[in-house]
Amino acid sequence: MREATTQIADLTPDVVLLDVHMPDGGGLAIVQHCITAGYSTRFLCLSVSDAAEDVIALIRAGARGYVTKTIESRELVSAIGRVHSGDAVFSPKLAGYVLDAFSTPTSGQSNQYMAGAGEPVAASEEDEEKRLVLDELTRREKEVLRLLARGYTYREMAERLFISVKTVETHVSNILRKTQQSNRHALTRWVGDR
């Protein structure tokens, strides 16, 4: 970890492609150190793991993206460019984890990603704004949004939720209106930014 953080401090890269599971502290420790130190470097995490805990921990630490090692090389180059320009980037399945982590649980439920070590996580103003928007969504719209963020097609969502494709389109239209996004790609980025 020390060598990596020293290199980042010396070279001041705009973006670091970081293998999450490294010896001597791993990627999480590197992101935490660099963000705490005030470096302007953006981190795109790369891992064989698609475990929700890994994704959420790194995003909460300040990483701008998380992709799995199954990503195609041209997609990886694109992801690095998008992180450089300020976008948040996730493999489709992982975007849903990020949405789940920042969703407000319904009464009686707890969100396992909203607390660390048993202590509540302080919400930023941006997180609170997102929660207010998400609270406006119906239960079914939230289900559609989670599937959309995970990369499901309208037809796949319809089959999974036992509704028609037209009904899925209506839900997506309502979600776009409520979140003030222009299309499903912008919506996926919006989810990833949160």
Image (cartoon, grey):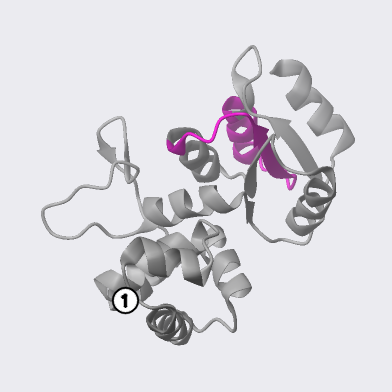
Q: Residue at x 41, y 86 (%)?
A: 170
Label 1 is placed on what type of residue?
Leu
Residue 131 visible, this orientation:
no
Q: Residue at x 57, y 74 (%)?
A: 184
Q: Residue at x 59, y 84 (%)?
A: 182
| Residue interval drawn in magenta | 28-52
Query: Is residue 114 placed above or below 143 in the rendered structure?
Result: above
Q: Secondary structure at mark 1?
A: loop
Q: Quadrant of residue 116?
A: top left
Structural crowding at the residue carrying mark 1, measured as other residues with C-alpha within 10 Å and reported as few (<14), some (14–19) or many (≥20): some
Q: Residue at x 63, y 40 (%)?
A: 35
Q: Quadrant of the N terminus?
A: top right
- Front-most of 11 and 145? 145
Residue found at the far right of this picture:
11
Query: Is residue 130 placed above or below 34 in the rendered structure?
Result: below
Q: Quadrant of residue 188?
A: bottom right
| Residue 191 x %, y % | 51, 63
On the image, numbered disc 1 is attached to which residue?
137
> Residue 60 in magenta?
no
Query: Is residue 154 placed above or below 17 in the rendered structure?
Result: below
| Residue 137 x %, y % | 31, 76
| Residue 25 x %, y % | 59, 17
